[in-house]
Image (tube, rainbow, N blue to C red):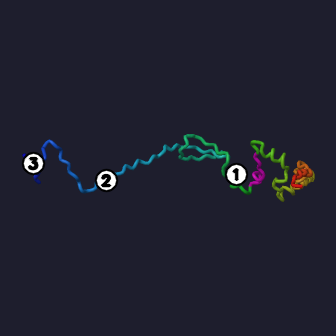
Amino acid sequence: MALSLSSSRTVPSWLPRITVSKTCLRHATLIPRARRPYSFTQLVRLSDGSTYTVRTTSPLALYRSTKDTCNTPLWQPSDFAMKNIEQDEAGKLAMFRQRFGHGFDLSVSRDARMASTPEDDEGAQDDNLSSLVTEYAKGIETEKPKVAASPKKKGKK
């Protein structure tokens, strides 16, 4: 018995038919919904006692501002009480002055000089840059460098 291959082949009905599509198929890209954080109503209290309301993500109901437009020299340049504020919370300014003196302090303004007494003027003259230099120079001891004699090299005699 010889087998012959013919162009007309029959496919059994129990096999699934696979159809190949010639068009491109692309599913939609999933874009997640934007996350919107919950916003709380916050009451901000300034240093002068005034308040205003703000919507914020902070859950704190009352915020007490320590620095604001009422007590900062940047916002109140004409207020004389804020001209010479030096906050030394950790004592670092006192340690700096103990080590390096008062030569780096700001000079006294003309209005403050006119209102000062003669005793204050004597103290201001003592706190100048020369005191800083002399205090620093006391800490340095001057020694002559010791020159070690170099050993003589032995050579051929």
Task: Check whether the beta carbons of the residues at disc 1 and disc 3 lie within 8 A of each other.
Answer: no
Tag 2: amino acid: Arg
**Residue at position x 89%, y 48% in the image:** 139
Is residue 86 one of those drawn in magenta? Answer: yes
How far apart marks 1 and 3 lie (CA) works out to: 104 Å
Tag 1: amino acid: Thr
Q: Which of the two discs, 1 and 3, sits closer to the camera?
A: 3
Q: At which x and y percent is residue 64?
A: 63, 43
Closer to the chain start, of discs 1 and 2, is 2
Q: At which x and y percent is residue 157?
A: 89, 55
Question: Would you name the residue on which mark 3 appears?
Answer: 3
Quadrant location of residue 98?
top right
Please tell me whether mark 2 sits on a helix, a strand or a loop: loop
Question: Would you name the residue on which mark 1 appears?
Answer: 72
Chain part drawn in magenta = 79-87
Residue 123 in sight: no
**Residue at position x 9%, y 48% in the image:** 3
Q: Nearer the viewer, residue 1 or 42?
A: 1
* Left or right placement of residue 11 versus residue 57 in this view: left
Question: Would you name the residue on which mark 2 appears?
Answer: 26
Closer to the chain start, of discs 3 and 2, is 3
**Residue at position x 75%, y 42% in the image:** 90
